[in-house]
Image: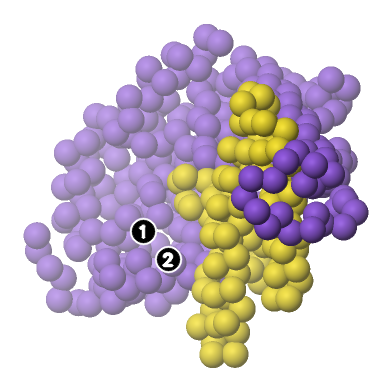
Amino acid sequence: MNPAPLPRDGTLDLDPERVADGLAELVLTVVELLRQLMEKQAIRRFEEGTLTPGQEDRLGTALMLLEQRMDDLCAQHGLRRDDLNLDLGPLGSLL
Amino acid sequence: MSSSDTGTVTYLFALCASRPPREALSAVPGHPGGGPLRTLEAGEVVLVVQDVPAGDFQEQALTERLDRSEELERCALAHHRGVAAAASHGPVVPLPLATVYLSDDNAVAAVTAREETVLAALKRLAGRTEWAVKVHASVREAPAPPSPPPPSPAPSSSGSAEQPATAGAGGGRSYLSRASARRRVLRDRQERARALALTVDRALRAYAVDAASHRPQSEQLTGVKAPQLLNAAYLVDDARRAEFVGALEQLRADERLRAVEISWSGPWVPYSFARPEQPAATAGAGAGAP
């Protein structure tokens, strides 16, 4: 009934040596939220067919580069993409 | 409000229809630092209580304690031990975690004021137990379609704002179309899984007197790397328990439900159905006729 406590408990660790990692995780989570919102919007426009082929290409390229950049940043801070999330209590999770 | 000068407050675990045997209570440690479990009477209702240190249960101290997961777990376990002891001999209305009164008199007065609803709740819960059922998306299913592989070299930085369609050599467009397809697959899979969870819920409601849906738990809490689709509790007559469990086993074995994972636990003290304030009778009527 009671799961064993997990190491990642969603709190910000204020240990001076680890606070930077905690902050990086928080900031990357926000960036990831924005990236997903942009991607969602781009895909919606793409599916509606309201973009010119040129716009589609530029948008797709930008999103692709952003995605790669996120992977790089996560790797730099020793995070997995799944780690980028926040539990918003009754609202569910952020991403 | 009569403040207690003994430095203790009265912690209320559960309400019973009759006094639990003394041995059942004395064997239970309750909250650390508190006295032995004992009973009070409010009309026909018996209260199972414990004297606990006031300092531990003041609003601010309590909020802080319950914010820490280990403390919350310890507190919840102590609470459950008290409730389980009270439930060992008959129906109980378990109270929410950390229900405290300044004194015995206050606790008795609060229960007396609601005696009728409490008695009705005790009557409704008699001979019934709670079963918790959780449905997850199956982990056997591929967790997500592969994300689009990074295609060949990025386009020579699209410097001028208005470049023609050839800028990304179609790389950007194909990324978009793959991302769109991936999203569609995910969405379809989620919708199918949700529909399956609903099927499970409907099937189980047929055997239950009442049902309650709780907010799905986070992956962090469940430790299962798949979204929780259903977190429900069912109030089941003891007479139908075998049928209910049989239905669960049948659902788990059902080939059509392979995309979801069903787990359950029980019987539990009916925590989810014990709020005397709730117009539970109407909720039950709604759930009883799917």
* Disc 2: CA contacts within 10 A as few (<14), some (14-19) or many (>=20): some
Q: Is residue B52 left or right of residue B7?
A: right
Q: Secondary structure at mark 2?
A: helix
Chain under callout 2? B
Residue A72 in view here: yes
Residue drawn at x 47%, y 29% as measured from the top left: B126
Question: Where does the image place residue B136, in percent across and percent down from the top left?
Answer: 72, 38
Q: Which mark is residue B98?
A: 1
Chain under callout 1? B
The answer to whether marks 2 and 1 mark residues whose Cβ atoms lie closer than 8 Å is yes
Question: Where does the image place residue B248, in percent across and percent down from the top left?
Answer: 74, 27
Which chain is assigned purple? B
Which chain is assigned yellow? A
Question: Where does the image place residue A58, in percent across and percent down from the top left?
Answer: 70, 45
Q: Secondary structure at mark 1?
A: loop
From the viewer's perspective, is residue B251 above or below residue B63? above
Going from N to C along the chain, the mark reached first, 2 or 1, is 2
Q: Which mark is residue B66?
A: 2
Residue drawn at x 47%, y 37% as measured from the top left: B272
Q: Which mark is residue B252?
A: none
**Count of numbered marks:** 2
